[in-house]
Image (cartoon, helix red, strand yellow):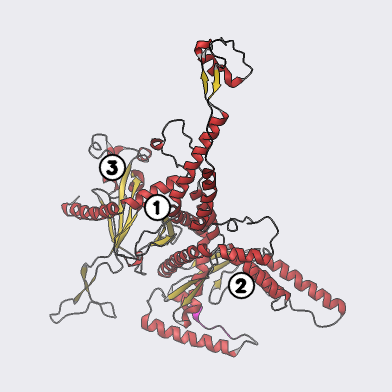
Amino acid sequence: MAKDDRVYITKLRTAVDKIFESTKEERTKMDRFLKEYKGQWWDEKELKSKHDSKVFVNYLFATVMSVAPLLTDNRPTWTIRAQKPFMQKYVEVFSLCLKYLWEKLDMDAKVFKAVVDALVMKNGIFKVTFDPDVGTFGECRIDVVDPRCYFESPGYDDNWECDFQGTRERKPISWIRRNFPDKGKDVKSDEDDEKAVKAGWEDRAGFELQSTFATLYEVWMRDDETESYVVKGENGEPEKDEKGKDKKEEREKYPYGKIVVFTKDVLLDERPSPYRHNRPPYVKLYDYFNPHDTIGMGEGDQIENLNRSINRAMQLMDKFMTLYNDPNWLVDETAGIDAESVKRDLPGGGNVWSYNSGVNEMPIRRVEMGSLTPDLYNYVALLPRILEEVTGVTDITKGMASKTERQTAAEVSTLIESSYTRTRQRVRNLEHFIKRTGYLLVDIMQQYYDNIRDVNIKGDQNIDYYKASSSKPFVDQMMQPKPPQPGQNPQIAMQEQKDWEDYQKFIETFGDKDTVYADFDIEIETNSTLPMDRQSLANLFLRLAAMKVVDPQAVIEQLNIPKGEEIIARMEQRAQAAMAAKGGGRPMPPPKPQGGPPMGLQQKPEGI
């Protein structure tokens, strides 16, 4: 490796390691919280003896497993709005593509993992990229990043404003060689750098490298470096300067930032960030915000010591119960009793020993235990109520009634509303996280979906297939006004014609030759991931249906009842049969097919 490269990565590595050193205390907490989440509350070094009880109650696990499923109970509902109204038809294509990607990328599982990371280790982190090797044309990719391996330079409240961030993690040598075939062979294990050559490092088989690791750094950063380029005219030919030479100008070499990947002493990759959105690829989820600090707070920050206090109290109670039910005994061997015989045979019961009563009338005596103070029991009963105040996880949140007598629906609804006050801020954080993730995905799709792709959405009974693309010929065809239909409102045709004209002007002024890009905003429907929101909406629609404000079809569609299309069809058939039996009125027209393609999206013909 060139000397300049070695100096370069040494400076980068030093900068990253310095950030990790400054946040070492927080990362140590993350490690500890993760162990406690898994139930590793007792450190062998902290126990006074090997006989100390290791009993524990894991409130950290209980809290995380109560909150995480609650936050992710439903899939989020989003709306994508074009900043220019005439492009709305175009961005609706990517709203459906986003729904398709939610299934394809297993977003339900990944969001749940990120939420658990945030609850346990302060932050959940997504890395949003495009993988050109997936499928025929490549596809968007989302990875869940370990918060302990992620870093960002200090001084920023928002990681999207940070100019220096990335990951430092241990990777198998086999993974490094597979992903960086050109320079990966030069990477040596962190454990045996000096012995690598003697051990025949480069000749090792792939399976031998699975258990050997190296520290891999990946940095996304801003860089002010510039480069010269030849200015070309509209005809593609270089323009000339006053001296008749090719005209050159300066421009940013890394307009969207750059990505540098390296190990301890090998520069594996340095390339411009390819993404037009000009954002870092990382999205952060917080459990609780820590004011003016990039590392948030998790559940362990608030309840760890409370949980430890409960476990210490339970340890005392468990030890007392053990000694009370399996007590120690005193044996007077001068009375003729063998202590080893008593130790061996006493637990079995039914034993008979002879002894000299003249020496001791009670040669075997139980060691009496004192009693635990009642304050200990009161303390153990009090701590769970304190934990409820701290975490916001109450009985009603966990689905348990808070009293034995029956409760009215209104009373239960009020309790649920009040029990979710702490949860609502977690929901806001999750919605912000999903919003940013969706923004990166939609922007990447506009950039890379330059080929016509098939998108499928599963309905009640079948799978609907559509075509989507950001290529200019496809979008031109999609944006063209449709021929007026009989009975159609003329204003609709006029609006489509106006949108088409505005679109043409926009493309002539700002559009690319190959792909179409539209600025957009994403809105996540508030509380759409909570189960409470669905139940409240269900109650509302049922009441409106009873008042005949909405029809049964609206209720079925809103509640997303399985096989709703069949139910609606049967209802209309029964209505037609009832009208025919009475002999009055014309038969109702056949029901319209449900789930047709959204405006501007071409449905793939059957058989293709």
Dot 1 or dot 3, earlier in sequence: 1
> Where in the figure is residue 375, as x and y percent of width and height?
52, 45
Residue 398 spot, x, y in % from top left: 58, 55
Could you tell me which secondary element the residue under label 3 belongs to?
loop
User: How far apart are the alpha carbons under marks 2 and 1?
Assistant: 41 Å
Return the disc, 2 or 1, that comes first in the chain's sequence: 1
For label 1, count other residues whose C-alpha is less than 10 Å away and answer few (under 14), some (14-19) or many (20+): some
Identified at 50% across, 49% down, the residue is 59
What residue sits 37% from the left and 52% below the top?
A: 148
As measured in the structure, the alpha-carbon distance from the residue carrying label 3 to the one carrying label 2 is 57 Å
Viewport quadrant of the C terminus: bottom right
Q: Earlier in the sequence, mark 3 or mark 2?
A: 3
Front residue of 36 and 256 = 36
Q: Which residue is mark 3?
A: 190
Label 2 crowd (10 A; few <14 / some 14-19 / many >=20):
few
Residue 210 image-quadrant placement = top left
- The circle on residue 560 is none
Question: In the image, what residue type sits under mark 3?
Answer: Asp
Instruction: Please name the residue that numbered disc 1 is placed on.
Output: 146
- Whether 140 is among the magenta residues is no
On screen, 278 above or below 303?
Answer: below
Q: Quadrant of residue 355?
A: top right
The image quarter in which residue 449 lies? bottom left
Q: Is residue 114 left or right of residue 355?
A: left
Where residue 553 appears, x then y in whole percent?
A: 69, 73
Q: Is residue 341 above or below residue 399?
A: above
Name the residue beneath numbered marker 2.
596
In percent of the image, x 34 and y 49: which residue is there? 169
In magenta, the rendered stretch is: 477-484
Task: Judge by depth and name the residue closer to the eye, 272 or 61.
Answer: 61
Q: Main secondary structure of the magenta part?
A: loop
